[in-house]
Image: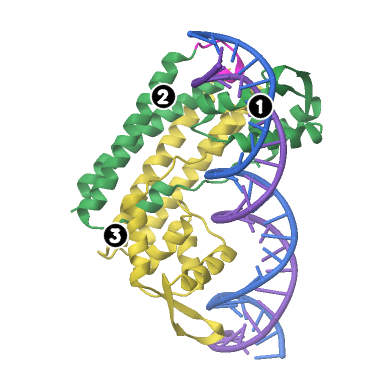
Chain colours: A yellow, B green, C blue, D purple
Amino acid sequence: MSLRHALLGILREGPASGYDLLQIFKVSLHNSWPATQSQVYTELTKLADAGLLAVTSRGPRGRKEYTLTGDGLAELQRWLIETRPEPHRNEAMLRVFLLGALTHDQARDYLEWLAKRAEDNRAGLEALEAAIDWNDEDLRFYGRLVLEYGKRLQAVNQEWATWAATQVP
Amino acid sequence: MSLRHALLGILREGPASGYDLLQIFKVSLHNSWPATQSQVYTELTKLADAGLLAVTSRGPRGRKEYTLTGDGLAELQRWLIETRPEPHRNEAMLRVFLLGALTHDQARDYLEWLAKRAEDNRAGLEALEAAIDWNDEDLRFYGRLVLEYGKRLQAVNQEWATWAATQVP
DNA sequence: TTCCGCATGTAATGGGTTACATGATTAG
DNA sequence: CTAATCATGTAACCCATTACATGCGGAA
């Protein structure tokens, strides 16, 4: 259950509405933790019911602004300290594992597509880096580390996929 | 719905029981696509009902051996050719994003733990590589590519996490 | 006044995890 | 005989995705 903690974490920066949070998910968090509109709104309601968030103001069009409570911050810290991430699924690699079911040409196509996607992703991250105005806040600081990771990861993805395509007979 | 295709793909190598498949998931596939016992058995039943697999023999203790059908192979190929993987969630990075909620010491601990885990994973992959007896079959060939990817990925993970830990004030 | 963007909510469905439940066979 | 391993199945719960459904406010 990590969406919950992602929301608590973003709200640590300051109050925001569900709509605001969705925009943040679209730009900064999309690469590490995608979330849908439906999911965000239902989770916010649950978090407010549980007392981890509070509705602190209401605006036009039914807009509700949520603020992190003391309990919410405590839960976020507990989760970060007491639990550790599980290794995650990698569908791209599962597919490589199964490529023996295709012809060599088809397999090579897939690997070349992976290389291209990695290159596109890398370019997207460079663009994001240029677009963000970096203040010295905590989230910006750690966001920078995540961005650096993304760039390194996409570089490896691209190098590996390019190499792998040459290995197919 | 990828577990379905993972099962079809493994059964392309030859008939196997649910129990056999679980062992394969434990050793070879655990890193790219973990699956639970419960999930494997229910999915096998569904696949047989759909005609993508057939029960071709029965052994002691109710053992059922499943064989890939023509329809099953066709579905596997269709999935590999017509669909492409979505980018996946990365909980480890989500956590980095949220580390501003902790003290610098606690954040550094987490990053150092990540580095250590990457090192352990890498060692595990080396051991796996040494343990596998490599025949020249398709699945072995592509399995080798996946293994190479795993090693490169863990190397980047380790380098990045080690570097990131030094960046924390 | 019309369209776009803001803004929220819910229902159906599917996949994954945990837990429960059972029992046969074989090696020591 | 007894423990470990082989072997399968099901129910409850949670999370995520897709689709449906609604409506206000501001800009042109």
Q: Tell me where residue B50 appears, x and y as whole percent.
A: 80, 36
Mark found first going from the N terminus, 1 or 3: 1
Which residue bears the numbered disc 3? B100
| Side (left or right) of B14 relative to A122 | right
The percent position of residue A115, horizontal first and vertical second, equals 51, 36
Instruction: Report helix, strand or loop for mark 1.
Output: helix
Label 2–label 3 contact, CB within 8 A: no
Q: Main secondary structure of the magenta part?
A: loop
> Which residue is label 1 attached to?
B18
Earlier in the chain: of badge 2 and badge 1, it is: 1
Query: Which chain hosts label 1?
Result: B
Chain that bears disc 2: B
Task: In the rendered structure, find residue B125 and report the number of the disc placed on it.
Answer: 2
Whole-percent x, y for residue C22 in the image: 67, 33
Left or right of A13 in this view: B86: right
The chain letter under disc 3 is B
